[in-house]
Image (tube, rainbow, N blue to C red):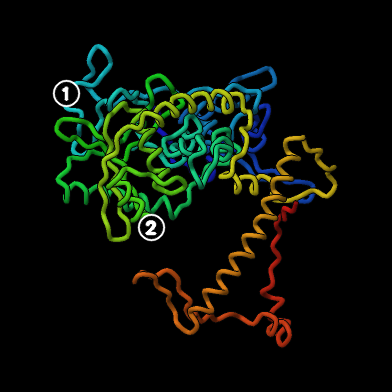
Amino acid sequence: MTKRPRMTAALRKALKRLALTEVGELEPFLRQTRTEDGLETTRVDPRTIETLIRCDLVHIAETSEGRRYALSTLGRCLSMGRPPETAPVEALPVITPTLDDVDPEGLPIGDPTEGDQWFGPVGHARTWYRTDTLTMDEWRARRFEYVGASEVSAVLGLNAYRGPLDVYQEKVGIVDGKIDAQVMRLGTLLEPSIIEFARREYDLEIFEVPQLLGHPDHDCLRCNLDGLAVIDGEEVVVEAKHAGARGSREHLTRFASSGEVIPGTSLATWFVQIQAQLVVTGLKRALLVALCDKDFHVVEVAPDPDITRLILGSIPAWWSRFVVPRTEPPATRADSKTIDRIFPMSDPERAPVELSENLAAMVVELRELRDKGAEVDARRDELSTMLKNALGKSETGTFDGESLVSWRTHERTSLDVAGIRETHPEIASQFTTKKTSRRFTF
């Protein structure tokens, strides 16, 4: 098996340079040269190219015009830039589970576990490759190939924080899909501890699953599992979460007691993620183990037939309709930040856009909502004023002993910016920054 390199800055620059070079030229960068202004150009060290070739990241072709380099499938992914739109996107090979003993049907036999790790089959899921041997760059690059369980809610429009347009842009390489480093570190540190706590406190047998699993019929639908429990001989999906205390405790408690999932909450996205994992694996039970402040929750989740049908009917269709042909999907409410990222600046030289009848109707509806909002704001101010008058100097208003409203004194310390500008203009100018944003009016 080819040894995968550690992605150094030199290797990453070489891959990106080759990805942007139409004819696959790297030789001009093998020597130091200087421009007419005497500036030294950047170059690719010959040892870097040797590493690229040895690790199967690039291929070489001898042509009549000289040596030409081409990105391999893995090299193309690791360059973090998709090939041109006209070029076909090659699928990465399937890597079967790493076991010495395999039966005639290709399934592992014997004990599927190695210590606390599970390398055997999981339900009816197809095993693509091991994940514990991937570098972070390789893992991120391979996320271009499929919709993960955590992304399903966004594609379906059931995620209040992320929409299908954002997922699409990551899959086709418009954005690199970087994950917040602090969030990643917190997850890396806390999730194993959460699972270990569940093992000890609830006497659960939970295994790590260092495999990427895929649906047997839809290659674009895959997932990773935080863990796999074995309860009374039955395999059970385990999803570990660390939740903030605000709202999450109430949502988890309500879900555990009645099965109610409130739309637009973090719990709703977790629920859809777990449903996607159950769809991929075909298993019939899952456990959500969540640490919320100092409260620990273990909630059993069963397959939801409606969401199961929605996932199987929508995710493969969305992939085929938008990602494969590289056709941008329509934006949703959750894509607000994505739109702001795509169009951060306006161009005063651009001609006005002639709106369609449908878009013009949206503007009319926006104005109506704005006018209604003004009426709502006026009524809210009126009610607030009357309640404040009733409270007087009291901080709290109650009804039947239950606190309904409060009006407390808060102190806030603020910087007198105007005073600093007037008395110390030279200091104010040193700390004055200009921010540019776009204002949307209708």
- Return the residue at label 2: 244
Q: CB atoms at circles 1 and 2 under 8 Å apart?
A: no
Q: Is residue 80 visible?
A: no
Going by the numbered disc 1, the residue's amino acid type is: Gly
SS of the residue at dot 2? Answer: loop
Residue displayed at 39% across by 43% down: 270
Instruction: Tell me the CA gap for discs 1 and 2.
Output: 42 Å
- Return the residue at label 1: 110
In this rendering, would 237 be left or right of 115?
A: right
SS of the residue at dot 1? Answer: loop
Residue closer to the observer: 208 or 228: 228
Mark number displayed over residue 429:
none
Q: Is residue 165 visible?
A: yes
In this rendering, would 376 be left or right of 162?
A: right
Circle 1 residues within 10 Å: few <14, some 14–19, many ≥20:
few
Q: Position of residue 247 (x, y in %)?
A: 39, 57
Going by the numbered disc 2, the residue's amino acid type is: Gly
Q: Position of residue 392 (x, y in %)?
A: 50, 83
Residue closer to the observer: 135 or 267: 267
Residue displayed at 48% across by 40% down: 158
